[in-house]
Amino acid sequence: QVQLVESGGGLVQAGGSLRLSCAASTRTFSNYAMGWFRQARGKEREVVAAITWSGRSTYYLPSVRGRFTISRDNAKNTVYLQMNSLKPEDTAVYYCAADGSLGIVTIASSYGDWGQGTQVTDAS
């Protein structure tokens, strides 16, 4: 089991930026595909971005493509989500998740380990 701890959320004006981090407590972080999900109030959890174990392949929700960037540093056991040009509709609790496969994983039920979430809120 992988313990995941997100940080970096907060209040941000529309058009602003935030960088989320997710630190994993495992020595085999590079064995995991990682994903960022979000859940807005009253809505289903949705995948925002996903990344393979190597970081060479990524996936983005169409509405965030070009604004968000997922990356990982396997030496630091950390995955990041850089969020630029934030919009009010990006307001949600953001979760990172780990899956023991190596490829892109976009289905929430495939992920076995989840962080506690970090709130991102539009301050406009």
Image (spheres, rainbow, N blue to C red):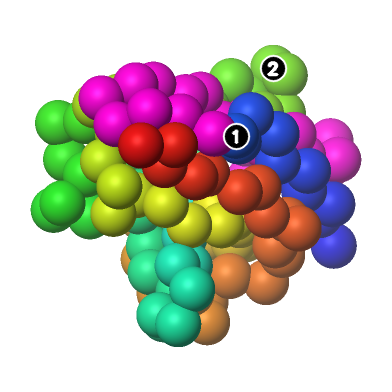
Residue 60 location, x and y as percent? 24, 48
Give how far apart the Cα atoms at labels 1 and 2 are: 26 Å
Residue 96 location, x and y as percent? 59, 51
The residue singled out by tag 1 in the image is 10
Q: Nearer the viewer, mark 1 or mark 2?
A: 1
Residue 56, visible in the rendered structure: no
Q: Quadrant of the N terminus?
A: bottom right
Q: Which residues are drawn in magenta?
A: 11-35
SS label for mark 1: strand
Labels in figure, total:
2
Q: Quadrant of the C terminus?
A: top left
Nearest to N terminus: mark 1 or mark 2: 1
SS label for mark 2: loop
Residue situated in front as seen by the camera: 65 or 34: 65
The residue singled out by tag 2 in the image is 75
Q: Is residue 2 above or below residue 24?
A: below
Q: Quick one: which residue is furthest to the front in this view?
A: 124
What amino acid type should be assigned to the residue bearing mark 2?
Ala
Residue 89 location, x and y as percent? 28, 54
Find residue 106 and report its image quarter. Answer: bottom left
Residue situated in front as seen by the camera: 81 or 57: 81
What amino acid type should be assigned to the residue bearing mark 1?
Gly
